[in-house]
């Protein structure tokens, strides 16, 4: 065979053509008019041998910078966290790696149980009554929450805090435009949602208030107060939360959240240049029949043995289209499994310890920057991230850091014009004291 993974020999091809009654491959395209067929040569490189191609691609791949060889302080929604080695071992098993939709429960018990465990652990972390089997990512989960709220309340306005991830807000806007739902931004004040503005904007037309906890700046929002204001006007309270942070923070479900969503990436899922990741979606019992995507339930068979099945599916592929609450067509079962394995391996104590290290190391970085004369914006409690005034363009700072083996923070000026020259610095449990000190020293040297 000329190809390693395509089991098609010239003999196979000849037999195939004989079976379907053609003498050449060109006959397969006979129905395509001659005048629209491409006759020239493709503008691509000449084919190389496998050995030469592997060498070329390896050289290109080596140009990428990653958290294994660089100290990364880039977060903004995607983080460098510890991943238990068992995660890759489990998700690489063929019964999980090749599994798709578990429509036939009699042959999908392993996959269904894995999803059920994911749902269970998400509920434990968030304090919600039930969770679905995952969404594409945190942004789409938040947008689906807004859509659910508008449909459930029959209202056409969403209030979204300015401290929610900018990309997630864009996804919410995209979803809302198709549903003719108005999206109003609640401005931030001192790095958190402006409570006074929220009270001013909140009315009987508001379907839901959407906030992030911890928010995009790493600040801890007053979730309980925001929830009370929302419920006073009959709206639903939606919280987008980093699940790792819930190892130490009070779960949104215990603070009045009706819907809690987020991205499970911090648990065992690689950064992967931004995806694919895994969104989670958890709700109260009141909303369980309106949850988008798939839900796995536990049952018993005719002999009383425990088993798992898909249940309560509110998408249009399974029920009447006019009753569907979402047209989300899949989930992220493999990444949900990775998150489940990571959460299981870490356990409650391990999750709490990693979350605590994020707080302690971020506090150390904040104090180190302040001692070096940098202005660290926003006071109060924070998790994982801080906002640092770089005193010059962030791109310029990051280019210099990169030259010294450090991946710098996110340039907030890209999405918050009033925070030009400010970087969002992420400090996870992976960062050492030496790496944090090196970051501060390098940035300090740029101003010497």
Image (cartoon, rainbow, N blue to C red):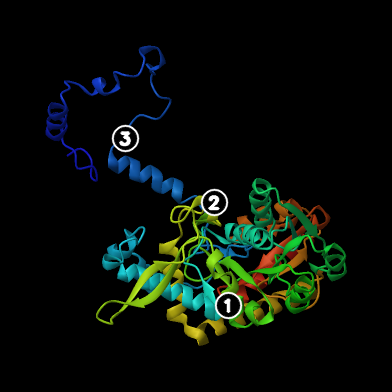
Residue 6 percent location from the top left of the image? 23, 42
Q: Label 1, on which residue?
A: 128
Mark in the foreground, 1 or 3? 1
Query: Is residue 409 or residue 191 the one in the foreground?
Result: 191
Image-based side of 330 in relation to 304, left or right? right
List x then y, in percent, for residue 53.
34, 41
| Marks 2 and 1, how far apart at CA | 28 Å
**Given this view, does label 2 or label 3 mark the residue nearer the observer?**
2
Residue lying at 48% horizontally and 63% vertically, measured from the top left: 270
Q: Secondary structure at mark 2?
A: helix
- Up-down: is 33 above or below 413? above
Q: Is residue 416 above or below residue 360?
A: above
Q: Does residue 375 appear left or right of residue 141 in this picture?
A: right
Identify the residue shown where x is 81% and y is 71%.
378
Of labels 1 and 3, earlier in sequence is: 3
Q: Is residue 341 visible?
A: no
The percent position of residue 424, horizontal first and vertical second, equals 71, 63
Front-most of 318 and 200? 318
Residue topped by disc 3 = 48
Measured in 3D between alpha carbons, the distance from the residue under mark 2 to the one under mark 3, in whole angstroms, is: 53 Å
Q: Residue 393 or 292: which is nearer the viewer?
A: 292
Quick one: quadrant of the N terminus?
Answer: top left
* Sequence-earlier tag: 2 or 3: 3
Residue 132 vertical placement versus 274 (above, below)? below
Q: Is residue 9 left or right of residue 140?
A: left
Question: Marks 2 and 1: which is nearer the front?
Answer: 2
Secondary-structure class at tag 1: loop
Location of mark 2 (residue): 322
């Amino acid at each position: 065979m000329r190809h390693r993974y395509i089991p098609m020999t010239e003999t196979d091809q000849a037999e195939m053509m004989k079976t379907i009654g053609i003498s050449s491959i060109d006959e397969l395209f006979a129905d395509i008019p001659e005048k629209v067929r491409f006759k020239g040569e493709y503008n691509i490189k000449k084919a190389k041998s496998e050995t030469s191609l592997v060498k070329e691609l390896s050289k290109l791949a080596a140009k990428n910078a990653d958290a294994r060889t660089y100290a990364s302080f880039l977060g903004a929604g995607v983080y460098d966290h510890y991943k238990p080695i068992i995660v890759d071992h489990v998700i690489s098993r063929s019964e999980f790696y090749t599994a798709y939709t578990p429509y036939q429960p009699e042959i999908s018990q392993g996959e269904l149980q894995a999803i059920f465990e994911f749902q269970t652990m998400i509920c434990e972390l968030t304090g919600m009554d039930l969770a679905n089997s995952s969404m594409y990512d945190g942004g789409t989960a938040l947008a689906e929450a807004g859509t659910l709220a508008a449909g459930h309340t029959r209202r056409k306005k969403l209030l979204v805090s300015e401290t929610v991830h900018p990309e997630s807000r864009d996804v919410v806007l995209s979803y809302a435009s198709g549903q003719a739902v108005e999206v109003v931004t609640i401005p931030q004040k001192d790095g958190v949602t402006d409570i006074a503005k929220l009270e001013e904007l909140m009315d009987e037309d508001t379907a839901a208030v959407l906030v992030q906890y911890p928010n995009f700046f790493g600040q801890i929002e007053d979730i309980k107060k925001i929830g009370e204001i929302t419920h006073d006007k009959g709206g639903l309270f939606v919280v987008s939360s980093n699940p790792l942070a819930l190892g130490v923070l009070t779960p949104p479900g215990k603070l009045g959240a009706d819907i809690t969503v987020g991205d499970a990436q911090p648990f065992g899922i690689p950064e992967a240049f931004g995806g694919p990741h895994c969104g989670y979606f958890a709700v109260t019992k009141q909303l369980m029949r309106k949850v988008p995507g798939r839900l796995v339930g536990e049952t018993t068979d005719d002999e009383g043995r425990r088993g798992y099945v898909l249940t309560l599916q509110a998408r249009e592929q399974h029920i009447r289209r006019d009753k569907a609450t979402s047209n989300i067509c899949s989930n992220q079962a493999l990444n949900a499994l990775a998150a489940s394995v990571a959460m299981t391996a870490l356990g409650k104590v391990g999750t709490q310890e990693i979350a605590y290290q994020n707080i302690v190391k971020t506090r150390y970085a904040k104090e180190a920057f302040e001692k070096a004369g940098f202005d660290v914006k926003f006071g109060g409690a924070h998790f994982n991230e801080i906002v640092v005034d770089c005193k010059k363009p962030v791109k310029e700072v990051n280019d210099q850091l990169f030259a010294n083996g450090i991946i710098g923070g996110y340039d907030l000026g890209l999405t918050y014009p009033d925070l030009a020259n400010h970087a969002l610095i992420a400090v996870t449990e992976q960062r050492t004291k030496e790496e944090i000190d090196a970051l501060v020293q390098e940035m300090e040297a740029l101003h010497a």
